[in-house]
Image (spheres, helix red, strand yellow):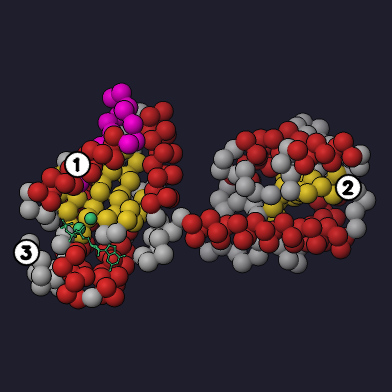
Amino acid sequence: MREQRPTLLIVDDQPANIHALAKLLKDDYRIITATNAAKALELARREPGPDLILLDILMPDQDGYAICRELKADEAIHAIPVIFVTALDQAQDEAKGLQLGAADYISKPFNPTIVRARVHNQVSLKLKTDLLEQIALQDGLTEIPNRRYFDRKLAQEWNRQSRHQQPLSLLMIDIDHFKPYNDHYGHGAGDDCLRRVAQALQQVPKRAADLVARYGGEEFVALLPETDSIGARQVAGRMQEAIHALALPHAYSPVADRITISIGASVSLAGQPATSSEALKQAADQALYQAKEQGRNRLVW
Ligand code: GH3
Ligand code: MG
Ligand code: MG
Ligand code: MG
């Protein structure tokens, strides 16, 4: 479990400087430290990443400006705020640091109370931003990832699998005859059903990189990186079984006595010229349409 205190990464080539800052901040934060650029970047990239980086400028191998530039150029870590803590006290040094994207700049010798206050302010802002991001990417009803998150992941995985020549599978999942369910059992029961289906679907894929999201309404998607059609078929089959096992009664469905799903699947094959992630989505959508046409409660490729 993640420790409750926010994490600070202190980067300085001189252990005595690290010690002075750590002493000042250790009661309120979990402290991790690095004395060179390579270690600093490694710790910044390790999950869960730091909530703030205190960065020295004058260091023998790679200076703090260069580290900051690298942090800000990497999409995965560019949102971690950086405060320079440095002996350089000229306006042009500070200007350079801020222009590189640092959140703040503290020159030495520092006032301990001011350092604590500046660190606190930047960490509060970071935690608020994290929370907003989490809310923006989660579906409010089912609490699984939403379409915005899915679209972002699809773009990332599409680029990755094209580079590494790996298959990428996509499942579009739609609840059958959900309108009559809502009409007869009520909207509240419909919402409950969506939550239970979402939870059940989310538990099916096993790999960390697999993603299940609510695409909209009563439609869900599963993104399965490095998964070919054999693997995706297994996942789809287990999803059908999981929803069957939920046994949510649906007396107004012409296809079964309970809630069922239709699944349209598509795979982008390793080694074949990639078309686009949009085409992958359209193929799954087309397959889903056919699954509905052919009588629902089934998987179509
Ligand atoms: P099909 O088997 O062809 O998919 O039929 P269907 O009735 O499931 O499809 P249709 O698109 O006609 O209806 C979807 C229904 O899903 C209509 C809408 O009221 C319901 N729905 C969409 N979003 C929500 C939601 O957030 N909560 C609830 N309760 N119902 C929703
Ligand atoms: Mg130094
Ligand atoms: Mg439907
Ligand atoms: Mg639908």
At label 2, counting other C-alpha atoms closer than 10 Å, the crowd grade (few under 14, some 14-19, many 20 or more) is some
Q: What residue did someone put label 1 on?
A: 286
The residue mark sitting in front, 2 or 1, is 1
Left or right of 292 in this view: 130: right
Q: What stretch is highlighted in magenta?
A: 264-278
Q: Residue 107 bears which disc, if any? A: 2
Ligand 2 within 8 angstroms of badge 2 C-beta:
no
Displayed quadrant of residue 94: top right
Percent x, y of residue 283:
23, 38
Q: Earlier in the sequence, mark 2 or mark 1?
A: 2
Placement of 63 over or under 40, stated as above or below: above
Circle 2/circle 3 CB separation < 8 Å: no
Report how far apart the C-alphas of labels 2 and 3 lie in the structure.
Answer: 73 Å
267 in magenta: yes
Of residues 223 and 10, which is closer to you in this image? 223
Residue 196 visible, this angle:
no
Percent x, y of residue 2:
56, 62
Q: Which amino acid does label 2 sit on?
A: Ser
Report how far apart the C-alphas of labels 1 and 3 lie in the structure.
Answer: 22 Å
Give me the residue at 58% from left, 47% from top.
46
Quarter of the image with the C terminus is: top left
Left or right of 179 in this view: 215: right
Give me the residue at 53% from left, 55% from top.
133
Q: Residue 254 bears which disc, if any? A: 3
Label 1, secondary structure: give it.
Answer: helix
At label 3, counting other C-alpha atoms closer than 10 Å, the crowd grade (few under 14, some 14-19, many 20 or more) is few
Label 2, secondary structure: give it.
Answer: strand
Q: Which of marks 2 and 3 is nearer the N terminus?
A: 2
Q: Residue furthest front?
A: 183
Placement of 260 over or under 247, stated as above or below: above
Q: Which of marks 1 and 3 is nearer the N terminus?
A: 3
Report how far apart the C-alphas of labels 2 and 1 lie in the structure.
Answer: 60 Å
